[in-house]
Structures are given as C-alpha cells and as structure tokens.
Image: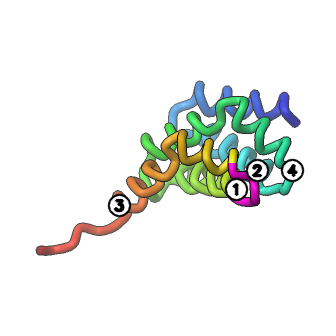
Amino acid sequence: EAGAVEVLVAVMRADQPGQAATATAAKALSNLASCDDIGLKAAIVKAGALDALVAVLKAGRPEQEVTAQAANALSNLASGGDVELKAAVVKAGAVEALVAVLRAGRPEQEA
C-alpha cells in the first residue's frame, strides 16, 4: 500500500490541478485514508500527500471534482483519534485552504 501511496502523490505533483489524473489520485488517497489504519494514514502523510492535497485546494475551483476529492482526502486523514495526524493536517495549511474554497464557492452578497 505504501508504494501505491507514493505513486499517487507523484501523480498529483506531476499533473495539473483539475486534470483527471489528479482527481483520480486524490480519490484513491481519500479511499485509502478512510480506513482506521493509523499506520496507513501516517504513510500517506509521510509520502507528502498533505502538501499535494492542499496545493490542489489552493489551485482548484469549488465546482471541480478534484477539489472535492482533495477535501475529502484531507477530512479522512484528520478523522479518527490520532492527534498527530490532525496536527499535521492543520500544519499543512488544510484548514485555511478549505475555508478559501468555501468562500470562493459562496455567491457574492449584495451590500
């Protein structure tokens, strides 16, 4: 599994955000991170997935599938009881990137 994680992260780094391969890699990382295996989640973080996922959020638009997949992967990585994983997600800038995506998706309010 860890070898697959490294390949998925490499695909995300090599591809342009919004491209199909990036969305597929983010979805696969999300699926892997949805398990309760803290060791697998740690391997995902160690492979550099956090930076790649946050980069997708920063570059994407709210309506893009890749943005949703990256957000879901980050959510799955932060879920569970491991405080170190949660801290790593926060330290990577995921919270700020998610808030920016939410704000970008909100229609402008008239004053």
Q: Residue at 84% across / 28% down in the picture?
A: 3
Q: Height in image: 108 above or below 9?
A: below
Crowding at dot 4, Cα within 10 Å, few <14 / some 14-19 / many 20+, comes out as: few
Q: Residue at 76% across / 50% down in the picture?
A: 33
Q: Are marks 1 and 3 in contact (CB under 8 Å)?
A: no
**Of the residues tagged 4 and 3, which is closer to the observer?**
4
Find disc 4 in the rendering and name its residue: 37
Q: Residue at 75% across / 58% down in the picture?
A: 81
Among the 4 quarters of the image, the one containing residue 75? bottom right
Residue 53 on image: x %, y %: 58, 41
Among the 4 quarters of the image, the one containing residue 106? bottom left
Q: Which stretch did the figure color magenta?
A: 79-83
Q: Quadrant of the N terminus?
A: top right
Disc 1, SS: helix
Crowding at dot 2, Cα within 10 Å, few <14 / some 14-19 / many 20+, comes out as: many
Q: Residue at 43% across / 50% down in the picture?
A: 96
Residue 100 forms part of the magenta stretch: no
Q: Name the disc covering residue 103, or none.
A: 3
Amino acid type, callout 2: Ala
Q: Does residue 109 appear to the left or right of 35 in the view shown?
A: left
Q: Name the disc covering residue 33, or none.
A: 2
**First-in-chain label (1 vs 4):** 4
Amino acid type, callout 4: Asp
Q: CA distance from mark 2 to mark 1?
A: 5 Å
Crowding at dot 3, Cα within 10 Å, few <14 / some 14-19 / many 20+, comes out as: few
Disc 3, SS: helix
Amino acid type, callout 1: Asn
**Of the residues tagged 4 and 2, which is closer to the observer?**
4
